[in-house]
Amino acid sequence: MVSKPQGFYQRLQELPLPAQQAFMGALCERLLPNYMLYQQTTGHGDSHTLGTVLSLVWERLNVPNASIDFARQAEKLAECEPPEEDDSFGARRALDAVVSVSALLDTLQGDSPEAVLDVSRTSRAGVRAFIELTEGEVDAQKLALIIRDHPLMDDENDFQDAVLDAVLEAVSEPLDKASLKEVRELGRNGGISNLGLSLDDVEE
């Protein structure tokens, strides 16, 4: 199993909460295309609601005293989960997006110190699962090396490093609207998900 050095997660945990939330928001943005692809290919899901809840989180980060009922948003989010009986790869990655936005919501409703680590690890685990799926049957030792050196895992690690750097840079100043917009745009990643997929992959 390939994971980032402990130092990365330590830096994440040492961030002020608003900076952690911006980091999580960026990673959630990058998970959204996987959810949208699942909805397009199966007819299940509600990407509009999922995207709206995430937008409300960004609104709260921009306007800390914005009056938003996040308990109600959490209820809406639960309705976005794929059907329990669907254990497909696409459903699991769609669930990753819902669970990650849910973890982000938790931080707005109370103490949730592990949330930022959970979202980071969820995104990495999705990439790992995708590589395992595409590589087929190989022994565990060989697979670990493939995952470690895979371009998608390199991209995931580079992406999370870039978001952390952007958030750290913003922390030296107040997390203003311009900084938040930049971090969110980074997360949108040109519409390409952590699995290297975009809606174009369905529409072509």
Image (cartoon, rainbow, N blue to C red):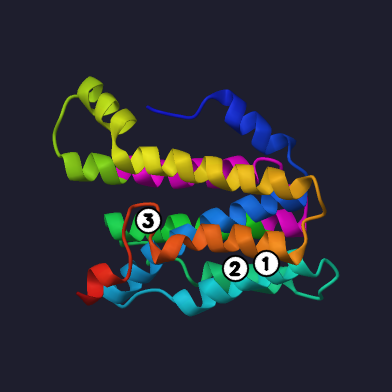
Percent x, y for residue 109?
A: 76, 59
Q: Is residue 109 left or right of residue 54?
A: right
Element at label 1: helix
Q: At x 49% / y 29%, what residue is drawn?
A: 4
Q: Which residue is under mark 3?
A: 93
Picture quarter containing residue 153? top left
Task: Give the tally of numbered discs.
Answer: 3
Give above or below for 66 relative to 164. Answer: below
Q: Is residue 32 left or right of residue 183?
A: left
Label 1 to label 2, Cα distance in Å? 5 Å
Q: Which mark is residue 57?
A: 1
**What segment is highlighted magenta in the picture?**
106-129
- Of circles 2 and 3, the one toward us is 2
Name the residue furthest right.
65
Q: Which residue occupies the foreground of this view, 173 or 197? A: 173
Percent x, y for residue 94?
A: 40, 61
Q: At x 71% / y 41%, what residue is drawn?
A: 113
Q: Which mark is residue 54?
A: 2
Q: Which residue occupies the foreground of this view, 139 or 174? A: 174
Element at label 3: helix
Q: Which residue occupies the foreground of this view, 19 or 170? A: 170
Q: Are marks 1 and 2 in contact (CB under 8 Å)?
A: yes
Percent x, y for residue 105?
A: 66, 60
